[in-house]
Image (cartoon, rainbow, N blue to C red):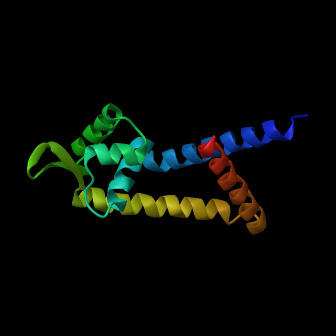
Amino acid sequence: MMNTDDRFLQALQGGARAWRLALERHLKAHGLTTAGWNALTAVADSPEPPSQRELARKLGVDGATLVTTLDRLVASGLVRRDAEPGDRRVKRIALTPHGDALAGQVNAEATALRRATVERLDADAMAAAAAVLEELQRLLEDA
């Protein structure tokens, strides 16, 4: 029999993997990867177009990784790179109208997927699980 620590970590990893795979099925239908969706959502959620450096920091990725993702999004007509007035080396990332519409559509689908999944779970168990995961995050961030 598996001890509680191992069971918890296995369930955490398995649940995260299952969520990611379910979401990726929806994203693929729109020609998006998880990285592309994360970038698109981060730009959509920004009060003003972020620089590539700001976006990389927000996403927790290095600049080279983000460049590849942005190249795909630009080629798909979802975002554009705008030069910063006064410093043409800085590029601001902005959604195109198509990118804005797709971000809204995919976010709505992700919300529907999440709701359809969690509504089948016990609300008290969900609250307890959330509290444990928040505490785990705090402990690991402070480690």
Residue 2: tell me if it is visible: yes
Q: Nearer the viewer, residue 8 or 98?
A: 8
From the viewer's perspective, tell me whether residue 117 is left or right of residue 82.
right
Q: Which quadrant is home to the C terminus?
A: top right
Q: Position of residue 134 (x, y in %)?
A: 65, 55
**Figure quadrant of residue 47:** bottom left
Q: Residue at x 23, y 55 (%)?
A: 94
Looking at this rendering, what residue extends furthest in the front direction? 142
**Figure quadrant of residue 124:** bottom right
Looking at this rendering, what residue extends furthest in the left direction? 86
Q: Nearer the viewer, residue 7 or 31?
A: 7
From the viewer's perspective, tell me whether residue 18 is left or right of residue 42.
right
Q: Position of residue 29 (x, y in %)?
A: 42, 48
Looking at this rendering, what residue extends furthest in the top direction? 64
Residue 33: tell me if it is visible: no
Q: Which quadrant is home to the N terminus?
A: top right
Q: Residue at x 73, y 38 (%)?
A: 10
- Height in image: 38 above or below 127? above
Q: Residue at x 42, y 58 (%)?
A: 106
Q: Position of residue 55 (x, y in %)?
A: 33, 47
Q: How many marks?
A: 0
- Height in image: 1 above or below 16? above
From the viewer's perspective, tell me whether residue 59 is left or right of residue 89.
right
Q: Position of residue 116 (x, y in %)?
A: 62, 63
